[in-house]
Image: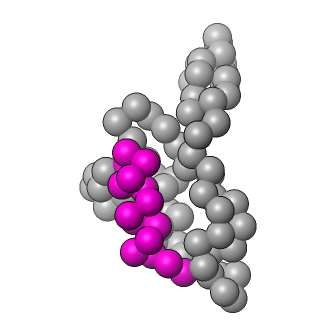
């Protein structure tokens, strides 16, 4: 987990934001789902959300051919 400060939605005061960094997934969707749950993310309306507002940043490869696993990536961005 990495903590950072980002500007508020209204462009005003900076607010803290926690990020979870996830490295190469290589198409391991089941392991990714298990990791997200272990980090405190829960399925919510077809995506994952963290009860404390953490967000995921994916680093590295999503699969061996470097194609995005759009279902999981879209879910993380929707949270």
In the rendered view, tell whether residue 71 sits above or below residue 66.
above
Q: Give residue 10's quadrant in the image.
A: top right
Residue under the point 45% across and 52% down: 78
Q: Is residue 49 visible?
A: no
Magenta stretch: includes residue 51: no
Location of the N terminus by quadrant is top right
Instruction: Say whether residue 4 is visible.
Output: yes
- Is 3 in front, or is 9? 3
Residue 21 position (above or below residue 64): above
Indicate yes or no whether the magenta region holds residue 31: yes
- Note whether 49 is above or below 5 in the view shown: below
Which residue occupies the foreground of this view, 19 or 46?
19
The image quadrant of residue 4 is top right
Q: Provide residue 3's location: percent of width, then percent of height.
A: 63, 30
Q: Position of residue 75 (x, y in %)?
A: 44, 60
Query: Which segment is the magenta one?
Result: 27-41
Q: Is residue 39 left or right of residue 42?
A: right
Q: Out of 53 and 45, give the one closest to the viewer.
A: 53
In this image, 30 relative to 18: left or right? left
Q: Residue at x 60, y 57 (%)?
A: 22
* Main secondary structure along the magenta-highlighted residues: helix
Considering every residue shown, the one lying at the far top of the view is: 13
Which residue shows up at 43% across the image and 48% down it?
39
Q: Looking at the image, how many numbered discs can be counted on the residues?
A: 0
Q: Position of residue 50 (x, y in %)?
A: 39, 41
């Amino acid at each position: 987990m990495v903590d950072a400060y980002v500007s508020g939605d209204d462009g005003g005061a900076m607010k803290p934001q926690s990020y979870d960094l996830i490295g190469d997934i290589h198409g391991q969707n089941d392991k990714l789902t298990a990791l997200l749950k272990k980090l405190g993310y829960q399925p919510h309306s077809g995506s994952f959300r963290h009860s404390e507002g953490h967000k995921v940043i994916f680093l590295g490869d999503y699969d061996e051919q470097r194609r995005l696993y759009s279902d999981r990536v879209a879910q993380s961005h929707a949270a």
